[in-house]
Amino acid sequence: MRKGIGVRMAALLMAMLFFLSFSCAAFADEYDPQQPEILSEGHLNASSAILIEASTGEVLFEKNADELMYPASTTKILACYIALNMADLENDLVTISQNAIDLVPPTYATIPVQAGEEVMMKDLIAATLVRSGNEGANAIAEYLSGSIDQFAVLMNQTAAMLGCSQDTSFTNPSGAHDENHYTTVRDMAIIARAAMKNDLFREMVRQNTYAMPATDGINGGHPQRTLVGGTHILDPENDYYYPDAIGVKTGTTTMAGYCFVGAAERDGITLISVLFFTGKRARWADTIKLMDYGFAEYTHFCRVFKKYTGLSPTEFSKNHTKWQ
């Protein structure tokens, strides 16, 4: 009898210890904003995510980084990057075609512009990035390549040139859903890193509003309009405002979920994050977690680096350049 009681007590004790260890592990796995350097894949809502340091491209954090995903309107980063490098920004005047408008699926974002409206290329790029105007992306493609299909070829060539893998395939400039239009967060980070090296691109994507100048056109054009974007981490009035944020681009479709490519800068360090298939608000929360993690990790690295070299990484880099 006593042996039976002892066995049952031992089994009960083991069960309690298992429960406590499981509970403690679960509790320990909860995200603590006071310890941003402790970040695991489970802390992010996104199905796929990556964080890189922009100057080197070093990967600081990743979650399913090579999984094929639909990028939605983050596609426009590449489309506008190409336009900034190909177009005569001060002189190219784009006439919006009816086709560019008709190709926008129902419920997708528009600037909006009307057929026959003439828009300076520089303004069209900015409006496309800030407002995520799909007809703007289509008009850019038609102007530069003659058709959406030909521009898609150029997009894929450019992605390959930048170092993207064969896991990236673009069929349109806007991110409208297509089964053959996909990429990975790793490749999108490569694209965003290249785009953020362009000063005008950086200037455009850090804005959450854009004052689009008045336009002319066969239908009378349009007076000046103010376009409002939806990048909450750039909005000081929003609960998800992140003071160090400097962009970049939102995206959403039913199949892609909510996506966001973000960038933040602190103490001369620029981080770029990519999130695919997350929630409407979770894209901001996930981005903040990634950025806080990256800056916390880099700050720790700087302290250790200076302890052993007597210089900050930036100071060391400058001195090293001089020594060369």
Image (cartoon, rainbow, N blue to C red):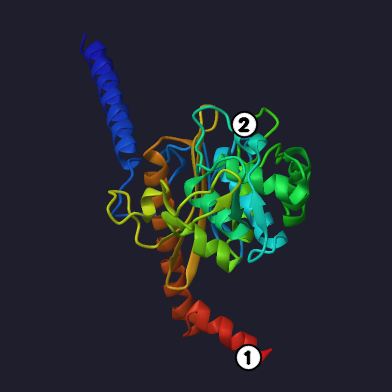
- Crowd tier of the residue under label 1, counting other residues whose Cα lies within 10 Å: few below 14, some 14–19, many 20 or above: few
How far across and down, in percent of the image, does residue 122 sit?
59, 60
Please give the residue where the numbered disc 1 appears in the rendered image: 322
Q: Position of 301 compared to 101: left or right?
A: left
Position of the C terminus, as image quadrant, is bottom right
Q: Is residue 290 left or right of residue 33?
A: right
Q: Residue at x 75, y 52 (%)?
A: 158
Place of residue 128 in the rendered image (x, y in percent of width and height, measured from the top left): 55, 49
Corner quadrant of residue 293: bottom left
Report whether 43 appears left or right of 182. Answer: left
| Residue in view at x 61 percent, y 65 percent | 198
Secondary structure under the numbered disc 1 in the rendered image: helix
Q: Quadrant of the N terminus?
A: top left
Above or below, comparing residue 191 to residue 111 in the picture? below
State the residue in front, 186 or 42. 186
Residue at 60% x, 36% y: name it. Answer: 101
SS for tag 2? helix
Q: Amino acid at mark 1?
A: Lys
Q: What is the distance, in whole Å, between disc 2 and disc 1 at their CAs?
A: 57 Å
The residue identified by callout 2 is 102
Q: Nearer the viewer, mark 2 or mark 1?
A: 2
